[in-house]
Amino acid sequence: MTDRSTTLEARRVLVGISGGIAAYKVCSVISSLAKAGVAVRAVLTQQGQAFIPPLTVATLSRHPAYTDESFWQAAQGRPLHIELGEWAELLVIAPLSANTLGKLAHGLADNLLTNTVLASTCPVLLAPAMNTDMWQQRAVQRNWHQLLQDDRYHSLEPGSGVLACDRIGTGRMAEPEDILIHIHSLLHTRGKRDLVGQHLLISTGSTREFLDPVRFIGNPASGKMGIALAQAALHRGATVTLVHGPLDDSLTARVGGMQAVGVTTAEEMHLAMLTHLPQASWVVMAAAVADVKPATQATTKLAKADLPGALPLAQVPDIVADLAQRRSPHQRLIGFAAQTGDIVAPALDKLQRKGLDAIVANPIDVVGSGFGGDRNQAVLLTRSGDKFAIAPCTKLSLAHQLWDALLRVGF
Ligand code: C5P
């Protein structure tokens, strides 16, 4: 049997497209979903159609697109908005115009899209896009906050940048990559917000321990696993502080919605984790901390001829062990163990030795897992003896399965 929590095959997503130039960006979302095997249907408002023709959407989704013209054509003898509302597991409205937002906030329905929203009960992901003055208009902000009081609606706040009206400001629709990640989360959780009220402190990435300003001891950890954990937690309603080592630009773009604290060395990571520890209810040390540093650091670049033949090393602080000592009894502490060979026995040893509540053991010598890639596999071990093996999947899916398992055992 297929595990519906890890595959998107045949999941049912309805994409609503209202009027805005950002409509062109939703085409790549539809295309990616369809390629992943998701059943995609799309509804365009009249203004949405002014920006992208239904034919484009139909071709990308491999299914005829719906417009207001189709509204009153009964589907299999039933009104189309009812049929579509019942069909959808998730509704995504991208771009969400000020007009459609206003209608939804007031429960109004004068076209196929708004009627379908009212005739459905599934989660709705909203990605607004509009000119800065429109977005900042008090009435629009009022509508936005009012709508989000309903748990059914999940938000992808607009970003800022150059807008199509040549203004620079807030109003840019979230990028397709962010929309896709949020869709994957919502298909996994079905909109459940089971981490509301939790403040998660997560570390990720690698640390760099410098010999001189250009040379360092480090490791290939990209930060992707911790970012996936942070995003999954955010989508489940948590407040997240992410302490991260140096990140690629593409990953820096994924830390929106959380408090991100950039660090470089293990000492900086230690300090940042201690600073944010008091607010945290759960702490996850997913970072691959360099265990050692050069015993001395030069402040100017060493000439090649001056490089030592052997490098004297010093220990860096064991951050997670220190957090285990300092935490309050209500704070949960989860470590990671990146291993080669047998991943379980050394992780169990670390769980005990470092005083953790749980540890995630993941192999770094298996093709398609571990450092840098988008996929991973793991075994979650808890102090009370639970053991969950998670098969190879995307890091986002792994993150959700870890939260599922931890919540199930009563974290
Ligand atoms: O490096 P090691 O395998 O011991 O890492 C296990 C756990 O300890 C990980 O959660 C890692 O983030 C943490 N760690 C740490 N400080 C170190 C080394 C590792 O917090 N100096």
Image: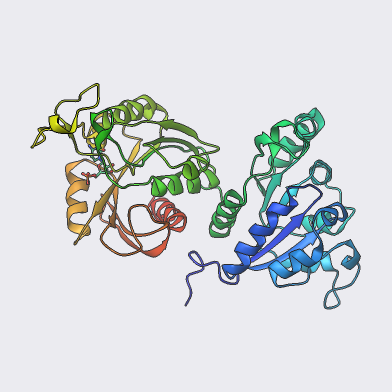
Task: Give the colouring mode of the picture.
Answer: rainbow
Q: Position of residue 237 (x, y in %)?
A: 54, 43
Q: Position of residue 381 (x, y in %)?
A: 28, 54
Residue farthest top in this picture: 299
Q: Which residue is more in the foreground, 355 or 267?
A: 267
Q: Quadrant of residue 266?
A: top left
Q: Position of residue 54 (x, y in %)?
A: 81, 64
Vertical side of 201 occupied by 233: above or below: below
At 82% across and 46% down in the image, what residue appears?
100
Q: Position of residue 347 (x, y in %)?
A: 21, 52
Q: Which residue is more in the foreground, 337 or 151?
A: 337
Q: Quadrant of residue 342?
A: bottom left
Q: Where on the image, by quarter, is ligand 1?
A: top left
Does the rendering let one see residue 232?
Answer: yes
Vertical side of 357 occupied by 137: above or below: above
> What is the number of callouts on the image?
0
Left or right of residue 78, residue 275 in this image: left
Left or right of residue 246, residue 177 in this image: right
At 91% across and 65% down in the image, what residue appears?
69
At 8% across and 37% down in the image, what residue appears?
310
At 19% across and 29% down in the image, what residue appears?
303
Does the rendering let one see residue 90?
Answer: no
Vertical side of 113 occupied by 135: above or below: above
Left or right of residue 75, residue 32 in this image: left
